[in-house]
Each structure stands twice: as structure tokens, then as C-alpha cells.
Amino acid sequence: MTPRLIHPVSVKIFRRESPVSDPDFGKVTPTWADPCEIKGQVFWAKFEALSPSGAGDRPQSDGHIVFYADEWAALGAGKGDEMELENSGRLVITEIAPKAHYGGKFHHVHVGFVRRRGS
């Protein structure tokens, strides 16, 4: 059995290639690889609802996106990389967790994100 995504949408993934530092100003500017597009199911956090605090090592996030594990692994994206949803702006990846364990393998990956703040 392979679990399916219910309402997949297109998500652009921007992977960092290497940081470029400016010795005069001490600023580090990342260089980005060409964006890749992948389908995922978006879940936004419910800010109005009562929820437990962020105790522990799990970071607070604005939501998460569920991707197929095989497709996510082929991208090679990681924490600190960015995603873009239509009409939602840039999102920074904060957490990656395997999910949906059936038949000896994980079929989904939950990717937590926060909205990118002004630079």
C-alpha cells in the first residue's frame, strides 16, 4: 500500500549551493541552484487553536508540507533551503521528518517551514 497525497499543489524548491562571503562587510550571501518543482500537500499551522508549547527539540513552524519520500530524496534539499508556494511567498525549511511507514519503508516526508522574514 502506498499512501497518497489528497490535494497536491506545485511547490518550487530553491537549494543553496554555496555561501559567498564578502570580506569587506562580513556578509554571507548564498548562491542558489536552479529551482525544482515538486508536488506536495500543504498544512498550515492553526494559530487560533490551543496547542502545546514548543518544549523539546521540535522547532516551531508556520506549517508543513507532505512530499513523497522518493521524490524528496531525488531533490537533495535540506534545512535552510527555501520553498515557494503560489501566493504565499518564500518559506524556509526548518524540519524534515520521515512519515508513513508501511512495508519496511517510509513513503512520505513532512517538511516544516517558517515564512521568510524581511532581509
Image: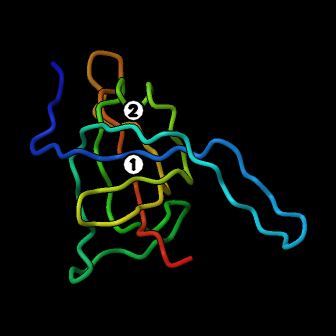
SS under mark 2: helix
Q: Is residue 26 left or right of residue 14?
A: right
Report the residue that reaches farthest toward the left: 6
Placement of 25 over or under 34, stated as above or below: below
Placement of 41 over or under 84, stated as above or below: above
Residues 73 and 103: in front is 73
**Residue 5: x %, y % from top left:** 15, 37
Q: Earlier in the sequence, mark 2 or mark 1?
A: 2
Image quadrant where residue 8 sits: top left
Residue 16, which numbered label? none
Placement of 108 over or under 66, stated as above or below: above
Image quadrant where residue 90 sits: bottom left
Answer yes or no: do the residues labelled 2 and 1 have beta carbons within 8 Å?
Answer: yes
**Residue 78: x %, y % from top left:** 53, 43
**Residue 102: x %, y % from top left:** 26, 22
Quarter containing the C terminus: bottom right
Q: Is residue 25 left or right of residue 16?
A: right
The figure's colour scheme reads: rainbow
Residue 72, which numbered label? 2
SS under mark 1: strand
Q: Which residue is mark 1?
A: 111
Residues 33 and 106: in front is 33
